[in-house]
Image: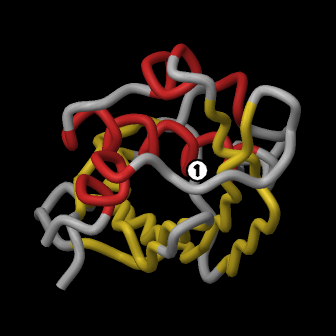
Amino acid sequence: MSFSTETELRVRYAETDAMAVAHHANYPVWFEVGRTDLMHALGVSYREIEARGYYLMLSDLQVRYRRAARYDDRLSLTTRVAEVRSRTAKFAYELRRVNPDGSRELLATGETHHIATDKTYRPARFPDDLLALLGRE
């Protein structure tokens, strides 16, 4: 089992269309919020990684929409480290609506793939300490 975090979100009015349905472009933004929370929970921030001379460049994004999120829905986003290699990392996401009775409905799943690069955007190996953090169970 890989390391995971849970992020609570609420669908804001500005994130919806005229039918009060969350626009599909918000899901990757929510995934980024979850990934940032996960990194903080591991004890490192993107700012710290960049200060050390590395970027985590997005190379692939997948979203599978199952049900619509709607205005003012309470959401729970589970983010986990799905795979880590010397130069790449994959994160997986499950977005659920938290209903008033506490039950949860799966709304979307997704993955993002990232490549470690140096400041000149050339592929680079993750530093050993970051590899150890990302590979934490």
In this rendering, is residue 43 above or below 128? above
Name the residue tied to disc 1: 70
Could you say where residue 19 lies in the image, as x and y percent from the top left? 79, 47
Query: Label 1's element?
Result: loop
Give the crowd class for mark 1: few <14, some 14-19, many >=20 residues within 10 Å.
many
Image quadrant where one finds the N terminus:
bottom left
Task: Describe residue 13's horizontal placement relative to residue 99 as left or right.
Answer: right
Task: Describe residue 26's horizontal placement relative to residue 120 as left or right.
Answer: left
In this rendering, is residue 26 above or below 107? above
Task: Describe residue 73's horizontal placement relative to residue 133 as left or right.
Answer: right
Residue 39 picture quarter: top left
In this rendering, is residue 4 above or below 5? below
Instruction: Name the foreground residue: 134 vs 129.
Output: 129
Could you say where residue 30 lies in the image, as x and y percent from the top left? 56, 44
In this rendering, is residue 68 above or below 83? above
Residue at 18 percent of width and 72 percent of height: 103
Residue 16 picture quarter: top right
Residue type at numbered disc 1: Arg
Instruction: Name the foreground residue: 135 vs 21.
Output: 135
Task: Describe residue 1's horizontal placement relative to residue 45 as left or right.
Answer: left
Residue at 43 percent of width and 71 percent of height: 94
Instruction: Name the foreground residue: 136 vs 5.
Output: 136
Could you say where residue 62 lies in the image, as x and y percent from the top left? 74, 74
